[in-house]
Structures are given as C-alpha cells and as structure tokens.
Amino acid sequence: MTKLAKSETELVDRLEDIGSKIHDVRDTIGTVIFGQERVIDLSLITLLSGGHALLIGVPGLAKTSLVEALGAVLGLDNKRIQFTPDLMPSDIVGSEVLEEDSKGARKFRFVNGPIFTQLLMADEINRASPKTQSALLQAMQEQHITVAGVRHDVPHPFHVLATQNPLEQEGTYPLPEAQLDRFLLQIDVSYPDGDAERRMLFATTGTEERTLSTVLSADELMAAQRFVRQLPVGDQVVDAILQLVRSARPGTGINQEIEDMIAWGPGPRASQALMLAVRAKAMMDGRLAPSVDDVIDLAEPVLKHRMALTFAARAEGIEMSDMMARLIEPLR
C-alpha cells in the first residue's frame, strides 16, 4: 500500500470513528431537547469548529437546557452567567483581592470569575452594558484574559454560547459589531412542531428523571476539532466561499444592485468561519470533504450577523433573509 493510500485509509477510519460518536451525541441530546434538530446540529458545528454561537429565540425554547445538555454529553465543565444591567466586567473575568498572611505581609491574589470554564452560557447577553459585554472579547478571540497586566489563560476547549431575546428590546444594549464578529454562527431558535411539543409534554411533566451520560470527553472533542481542520477543501468550494462573502461587501463591484442595499458587510473572519463550518458539517455527515451545498446551507447562520442593510433597503421592506437568498442564488 502506498503512503498516500495509507494516509487516506487512516483518514477514513478516523472519520468513521469520530462520526459515530458525534451521531451518538446528537441522539443523546435529542432525548432531552425536542424538535430542535437544526439547532442541535448548528451548535455541534460551532463546537467542532472551535467557535462560539449566538442563540436567538424567545424565552422557553430550551436554550439553557441545550447548553447544559451539551456540557453533560461532551464532558465539558459549564457555567452560566445571567447578564443584567448592573453586571460588571469583574463579575465575569474575576478580580484581585488583597490578602494578608500570618506574618502581616499583604499581597494581591487573583480570584477566577465564571469565565474560567470550558462551556460558558452568557444568558441574555444584550442586557448588560457594552463595557461588560466587552469583557468577553479577549477570551473569545485569544483564549486568555489580562488583569492588572497579568495574563490568565482560560481552560481548553473554551466556548461561549450566548442567548438573546429578539422580542423585548427595552433596557437592552445591542451587541457591537466587533463582538458579533466573534460569534462563528448566529443560530435562530424557533418553536418546535406539534409532534415534538407533544413528546415534550409527556417527557417533562412526568415523574421520570432525565439523566444524560457523557458520550465524548473534552480531549476527544479537541481531537475532533483538530481533525476538522485536516479535511481537504476543493477549489470549487473555496471559490464559492470567497464569491459569497465578497459579494456581501459594499464596494467590490461584483453586484452593484446588492451592494447598494448593504451598509456594511462581512470581513475575512467570515470566510474563515465558513471554511471551518462546512468542514465540520461534512464530518458530521460522514463525508471526507465539504461541498458547495454545505456553503449554501451554512451561509445564513455565518453571515447574517456580520452585515447590515441600508436604511433605504429596510424602508423597501427587504429583510436579511431576502438578502441572503439573493447572495446564495448564484451558487445554486
């Protein structure tokens, strides 16, 4: 057997092994989260890509339960922060306290905040002030924080799953573009269908306790994340990613009609996010390489929080979903 053929065989074997475990993770989470298969898949794509996700949905759609389930099934230490207007940055990252030893000497000791966890749920993130929201920025991008000039690394892996209520906007602070760009995907959580809600009623209002077993360890998750980055991506898929992202930016001259409706568009981080996401989706589906269909499927959750429509476009009744359909059309 040639070296290349052996390498391909090893890749296939690893794909089958990891894919089987990811399939078990999906099934296990599906026993407690009903009717949200798309949300579960996008959440797993986010984690397998090593990124963060913004979950947007009305209260009561199991967003908190989803994060808890992911932490349990993936063997991740998880914590939850309820964002409120009076929350301070030190409530998230931690602070230094002055201590005195037995000899009377005083020194500062850093006390870790809840950000030092593997899976952090930032609940209703837009209820905190921009100053507090920004406390997450450094950790989300650089995997560490700096307090009083001292670097403190967060655990590995580190993922933030933030939630936001799209209905109630009174007393909220819109997330700045810099922070929105840190989220790999924006995941819209919708109402479950009738059959799923029926199953939910029986499963959640009875006496039976629902327990989740660990299917994948934190080390195995990080190994899967490294494997995602090894999957080959064809030139056709790369061209589709670049065409899609660049056409969503004003000033490129690709499609003047679309450009006139876009106030600002996605940067290079969007291309990187889409490249990782399509690889993760291919791996979850048991494929060795992503396709253009994967680009089309993940275009909206990757791009829509990284761009904005002009006032004129919004005045004409054009919504972001309409714009995404126009951007995707040339790829079909």
Image: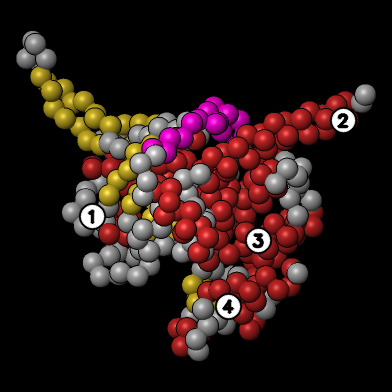
Whether tag 4 and tag 2 are in contact, CB under 8 A, the answer is: no
Residue 154 in percent (x, y) is at 40, 33
Q: Nearer the viewer, residue 7 or 25?
A: 25
Q: Is residue 154 left or right of residue 6?
A: left
Image quadrant holding the C terminus, namely bottom right
Give the alpha-carbon distance from disc 4 to disc 1, as whole Å. Answer: 33 Å
Residue at the spot x=62%, y=50% of the render? Answer: 277
Q: Which one is earlier in the sequence, the residue at label 3 or at label 1?
A: 1
Q: Nearer the viewer, residue 197 or 216?
A: 197
Q: Which one is earlier in the sequence, the residue at label 4 or at label 3?
A: 3
Whether tag 2 and tag 1 are in contact, CB under 8 A, the answer is: no
Question: Does the stretch in magenta take in 323?
Answer: no
Whether tag 4 and tag 3 are in contact, CB under 8 A, the answer is: no
Residue at the spot x=35%, y=34% of the render? Answer: 116
Helix, strand or loop at disc 4? helix
Mark 2: few/some/many CA within 10 Å (<14, 14-19, 20+) = few
- Please determine whether, in this image, residue 292 is positioned above or below residue 154: below
Viewer-nearest of labels 3 and 2?
Answer: 3
Q: Which one is earlier in the sequence, the residue at label 4 or at label 1?
A: 1
Residue wearing tag 1: 84
Amino acid bearing label 3:
Asp
Give the alpha-carbon distance from disc 4 to disc 3, as whole Å. Answer: 15 Å
Amino acid bearing label 1:
Thr
Q: Which residues are magenta?
A: 209-225
Helix, strand or loop at disc 2? helix
Residue wearing tag 3: 297
- Please determine whether, in this image, residue 183 is positioned above or below residue 141: below
Residue at the spot x=70%, y=65% of the render? Answer: 243
Residue wearing tag 2: 4
Mark identifier at residue 198: none
